[in-house]
Image (tube, rainbow, N blue to C red):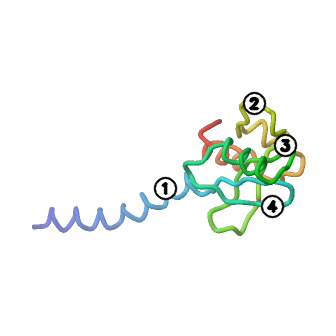
Amino acid sequence: MERIAIVSILTALLVPFTAARATEDGDYKKICRVSENLKVLADSNDANSCRQIAVGSQAQEYQIGCRDRDNNGTIIVTTPFGITDKAARVTTSKLAANTQNTATPEQFAKCAKAWGSR
């Protein structure tokens, strides 16, 4: 009986910790910026989704990146891609190359991870 009580207590303590860790890795949403318009993308979307938005808007370039899940913090985007550019990807180096980003290297890495890159 004591073992069950101990396991129950430990489980109750570990569940919030595990949930916090899961949100820590996924604390960024994918975004697409075309001109000055910002659109949050589904987690399953890729860079081509943003390119399609740009083409539909008759824009010549677009940016991909992240913002925090609560929409309170920094917006991080790559330097602009032309709509004819091939293989647009979010990487830490492409995020760092945009001098308008004020994020930390850790934030760049988390954003790139949200896009499946490093």
**Residue at image point 22% right, 62% down:** 7
Q: Which residue is mark 3?
A: 79
First in sequence: mark 4 or mark 3?
4
Q: Is residue 78 above or below residue 103?
A: above
First in sequence: mark 3 or mark 1?
1
Seen from the viewer's position, the closer of residues 96 and 43 is 43
Q: Which residue is mark 2?
A: 86
**Element at badge 2?**
loop
Q: Is residue 97 above or below residue 69?
A: above
Q: Which residue is mark 4?
A: 37
User: In front of the other: label 4 or label 1?
Assistant: 4
User: In front of the other: label 4 or label 3?
Assistant: 4
Residue at the far left in the pictured view:
1
Task: Give the alpha-carbon distance from disc 1 to disc 2, as whole Å.
Answer: 35 Å
First in sequence: mark 1 or mark 2?
1
**Element at badge 1?**
helix
Q: Which residue is mark 1?
A: 21
Q: Residues within 10 Å of mark 3 (few under 14, many from 20)?
A: many
**Residue at image point 63% right, 43% down:** 46
Q: Are marks 4 and 3 in contact (CB under 8 Å)?
A: no
Q: Are marks 1 and 2 in contact (CB under 8 Å)?
A: no
Amino acid marked by disc 1: Arg
**Element at badge 4?**
strand
Task: Give the alpha-carbon distance from disc 3 to disc 1, as whole Å.
Answer: 30 Å
**Residue at image point 81% right, 39% down:** 83
**Image coords of residue 5 (percent x, y):** 18, 68
First in sequence: mark 4 or mark 2?
4
**Residue at image point 72% right, 49% down:** 65
User: In front of the other: label 3 or label 2?
Assistant: 2
Amino acid marked by disc 3: Thr
**Image coords of residue 19 (percent x, y):** 44, 61
